[in-house]
Image (cartoon, rainbow, N blue to C red):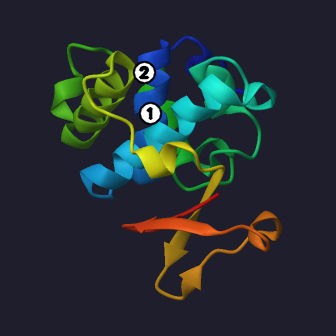
């Protein structure tokens, strides 16, 4: 993991992960992604016990895989994170507000999503299927994401 990511606060990491995974999604989709992360922090120790541990766990959130097209953008943001200039990027600002609201409890987690284990990104050609989702039940389809439990 690049050291630039490791210097971020938990709310910044949650915001950056939501940005990397769901910035083009409706608010409901961003909240759902954040809900999955916080549920893992609260109830799945093998994923990690903190927001950074969960988000940076290898192969959990594709935006942190070096081959992912989002990775360079996330790295640039992490290297130059400045809370004073963040409002200039409206999408990041929106994701930060959602992350802060989820952490504080001012934005409720998506109940049915918070209990899910995984999500896949759906494309116009169908969901990008992974071997782990063969025996899992679809919980919700929000925007471009399919959530499994």
Crowd tier of the residue under label 2, counting other residues whose Cα lies within 10 Å: few below 14, some 14–19, many 20 or above: many
- Place of residue 31 in the rendered image (x, y in percent of width and height, measured from the top left): 36, 43
| Quadrant of the snapshot with the N terminus | top right
Numbered mark located on residue 12 in the image: 2
Q: Quadrant of residue 50?
A: top right
Answer whether residue 98 is visible to the viewer in this image.
yes
Q: Read off the residue under disc 1.
A: 16
Q: Secondary structure at mark 1?
A: helix
Instruction: Give yes or no for contact between labels 1 and 2 (Cβ–Cβ under 8 Å).
Output: yes
Residue 41 in percent (x, y) is at: 62, 25
Q: Which mark is residue 49?
A: none
- Residue 20 in view here: no
The C terminus appears in which quarter of the rendering? Answer: bottom right
Q: Secondary structure at mark 2?
A: helix
- Whole-number angstrom distance, CA of label 1 to CA of label 2: 6 Å
- Where is 82 relative to 137, above or below? above
- Lateral position of residue 149 relative to residue 106, left or right: right
Bin the neighbour count of mark 1 within 10 Å (Cα to Cα): few under 14, some 14-19, many 20 and up. Answer: many
- Name the residue at 42% across, 19% down: 11
Give the residue at x 19% y 39%. Answer: 90
Q: Horizontal placement of 141 versus 40: left or right?
A: left
Horizontal arrangement in the rendering, residue 26 relative to residue 9 (left or right): left
**Residue at (73% x, 33% y) in the render:** 57
Quadrant assignment, res 101: top left
Compared to residue 1, the image places residue 131 above or below, namely below
Taking depth in this image into account, of 1 and 129 the one nearest to the observer is 129
Question: Residue 93 vs residue 125: left or right?
Answer: left
């Amino acid at each position: 993991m690049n050291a630039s990511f490791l210097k971020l606060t938990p709310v910044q990491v949650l915001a950056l992960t939501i940005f990397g995974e769901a910035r083009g999604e409706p608010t409901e989709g961003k909240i759902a992604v954040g809900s999955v992360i916080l549920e893992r922090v609260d109830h799945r120790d093998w994923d990690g016990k903190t927001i950074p541990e969960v988000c940076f766990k290898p192969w959990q959130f594709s935006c942190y895989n070096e081959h992912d097209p989002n990775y360079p953008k996330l790295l640039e943001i992490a290297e130059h994170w400045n809370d004073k200039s963040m409002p200039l990027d409206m999408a990041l600002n929106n994701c930060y507000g959602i992350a802060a609201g989820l952490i504080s409890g001012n934005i409720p987690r998506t109940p049915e999503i918070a209990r899910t284990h995984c999500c896949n990104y759906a494309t116009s050609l169908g969901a990008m299927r992974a071997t782990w989702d063969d025996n899992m039940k679809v919980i919700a389809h929000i925007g471009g994401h399919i959530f499994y439990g």
